Image: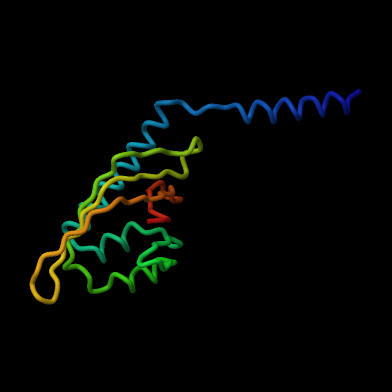
Amino acid sequence: MTKTIFICLYFICILCSCNTTPDPAQIDKWKQEIVNAEHAFAKLVSEEGIHKGFTTFAADDAVLMRNNQFIAGKSAIDTLYNGTNATNLQWAPDFVDVSASGDLGYTYGSFTVTSVDSTGNTIENRGVFHTVWQRQADGTWKYVWD
């Protein structure tokens, strides 16, 4: 009988833990934190360049996909963007969502890259970005995919 009661209590605890819903205010707070991180990221890129922004906001294990290649790890991202601060990159998130646990989130929106080619012509490219954010141990948000 004791074993049956224990098993029933165990399954009740499992079911109750699966049905917990986070407070909507907490979800909104986490979403705002991610939006704030995205804006701070864009501001740093605007003020100090792509290299500084992309290395500062990268998690240690972040991954970028550029020119159909994966750039894996903060060190590789540092190498990729070293010396590319002259390019103008602007973006803002149009959408944000966050996991119920508040440890992962994502944004997407439009970006514009403006650069000058070797002949002095200005080239402007527009596109859509998608960034996955992860809460770090210190509570900050860093991107793990861009």
Residue 124 position, x and y percent, is 17, 59
Q: Judge by depth and name the residue closer to the eye, 54 or 140.
A: 54
> Which picture quadrant has residue 122?
bottom left
Residue 81 in percent (x, y) is at: 29, 70
| Residue visible at 37% across and 56% down in the picture | 146
Residue 121 lies, in percent from the top left, at 9, 69
Q: Nearer the viewer, residue 121 or 29?
A: 121
Left or right of 86? Residue 10 is right
Hey, which quadrant is residue 35 in on the image?
top left
Looking at the image, which residue is at 28% across and 43% down? 93
> Horizontal and vertical percent for residue 18?
63, 30
Instruction: Left or right? Give the position of 72 relative to 8.
Output: left
Q: Furthest residue to the left?
A: 120
Question: Which residue occupies 22% across, 70% down?
Answer: 84
User: What residue lies at 75% left-to-right and 28% top-to-bottom?
Assistant: 11
Q: How is the image coloured?
A: rainbow
Total number of numbered discs in the rendering = 0
Of all residues shown, which one is farthest toward the right? 1
Please, which residue is most extreme toward the bottom here? 118
Q: Nearer the viewer, residue 116 or 53?
A: 116
Quadrant of image for the N terminus = top right
Location of residue 78 with respect to 105 vertically, above or below? below
